[in-house]
Image (spheres, rainbow, N blue to C red):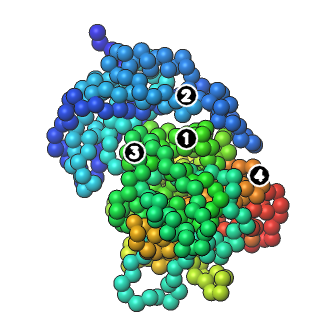
Amino acid sequence: MAIERVALLGSERSLAANASQVGTPNPHEYIDVTVILRRRAKLPHHHTKPISREEFAAKYGADPADLKKIEAFARMFDLTIMEVDLARRSVRLGSTVTHMNEAFATQLRLFQSPDGTYRGRTGMLYIPTTLQHIVEGVFGLDERPQARTRFRRGLRTGPLVSGDTSYTPNQVSALYDYPSGNGAGQTIGIIELGGGFSSSDLTTYFSNLGFATTPSVTAVSVDGTTNQPVGDPNSADGEVLLDIEVIGSIVPGAQIVVYFAPNTDQGFLDGITTAIHDTMNNPSVISISWGGPESTWTSQALTSYDQAFQDAGMLGVTVCIAAGDGGSSDGVTDGQAHVDFPASSPNVLACGGTRLESSKGKITSEVVWNDGSSGGATGGGVSEVFPLPAYQANAGVPNSVNSSNFAGRGVPDVCGDADPDTGYQILVDGTSGVFGGTSAVAPLWSALIALINASTGTPAGFVNPSLYFEAAGTAAFHDITSGNNGAYQAGPGWDPCTGLGSPDGAQLLAVLSGGTTAAG
């Protein structure tokens, strides 16, 4: 019997850069996909205080009636329902390549790219008309690597330049005048798409910093990916340890939960939604230092990830994301400006990078991070996907420098030390090194938000409106006015290299707790 179908809007996949088809997967190979369902009700435009995860699931999760239609669809195509999470609006379906091809009217192929061989697809997906408006995304058929780390190792081989140095994370937080406290009572989630950490590294690192105990770090497996150190500091291990050690150094009393997920659009999304809706660990801050140019994502991914970050705001969860290390091009070689996603979501705190110099515990110079010799520079610019959010309406965000002239969301929102030549002293796989990149800035800001949460007793949640409407132009930020990231120049006020600036933590606490601060 013929099944009437419609195209799943936003599902179109293009061939990855420099990829070519090399074959077809085994038709009997068992694979799984994540299907995202519509919300039971639209989120309110304005919300002032967080709601519980249980209340959220009941009001805004997936509708059980929609799930019934997914169950009927699964039976029709011999798909197995592996997992259902109504709060995440997520259903995992498993079956063979043959049945998945039939279910979504596609043809899975094997492709070879510089990243290796992967199972993938091109074109649109098609779903039965009975699921139209119910299914908003299908992830996992294509398993190409979706994101990259945003760290850079300090590997200067020539003579040191004046101002080159390295810091412990505590020294950086002191330069930024972070509030006192150890983050006790807070939980920070970290999303990782590979690599791992060893207890011995953490014990040695924090012992060397003079800590009597090692911060609590727990690994959570998502979609079968576990904590698996590679043994190479240049691998994803570098990202994992950078994130943990920056956060643990600044808020050693906080609980750190690391969500390990596959590096695919499915795995990344599942990791994010698992962390946001985690009723066991209840993180109030999530740090993400992975991403990729907006142009490399499907529309359904851009939408589904952004909706997950909207969920986070409703739940009082602050999401801090690295803005990228490839300058205004974000590493794309088409001559256009690009911003990094998911940092370009208007529902996250996008974190850009600076070069930070100091003397006697005081900042002496802070400029845009742009190291032309290594090609590393802070990401930043204007989204080509997300329109200018209301909180940036008066920030002076320019239109895109591209021919689109799009009036988009400006990236980043804030910044912090990222230059590997003024980077962070980190221990990875038994090897000490200096790391930088905007990968360091997302955990740096995550730790600051955790300190603020601990001080106020309430989660800061989606902080962007408060930062733009209350803290901008005050002593809560060090305004970075010198430098560029390629197509964009720093200047007074918000700019597409360093956002509102780097933090004065104590002053920012005063703003977010309802106090006042001096003009900047």
Q: Amino acid at mark 3?
A: Thr
Q: Report the front residue among 345 and 141.
A: 141
Front tag of 1 and 2: 2
- In this view of the protein, can residue 295 be seen by the observer? no
Which residue is tagged 2?
Answer: 86
Q: Is residue 213 left or right of residue 28?
A: right
Q: Which mark is residue 225?
A: 3
Name the outermost residue toward the top: 1
Identify the mark nearer the N-term, 4 or 3: 3
Can you give x and y, in whole percent of width and height, for residue 30 in the image? Answer: 28, 31
Q: Amino acid at mark 4?
A: Gly
Alpha carbon distance from label 1 to label 3: 21 Å
Which residue is tagged 4?
Answer: 457
SS of the residue under disc 2: loop
Q: Amino acid at mark 1?
A: Ala
Instruction: Identify the residue at image location x=37%, y=23%.
Output: 80
Can you give x and y, in whole percent of width and height, for residue 520 in the image? Answer: 74, 72
SS of the residue under disc 3: loop
Alpha carbon distance from label 2 to label 3: 22 Å
Which residue is tagged 1?
Answer: 308
Alpha carbon distance from label 4 to label 3: 34 Å
- In this view of the protein, can residue 103 be seen by the observer? yes
Q: Amino acid at mark 2?
A: Leu
Q: How many marks?
A: 4
Contact, mark 4 vs mark 2 (Cβ under 8 Å): no
Alpha carbon distance from label 4 to label 1: 24 Å
Category of crowding for the residue at label 3, using alpha-carbon neighbours closer than 10 angstroms: few (below 14), some (14–19), many (at least 20): some
- Of the 4 image quadrants, the one containing the N terminus is top left
Instruction: Identify the residue at image location x=60%, y=64%.
Output: 213
Instruction: Identify the residue at image location x=41%, y=27%.
Output: 82
Alpha carbon distance from label 4 to label 2: 29 Å
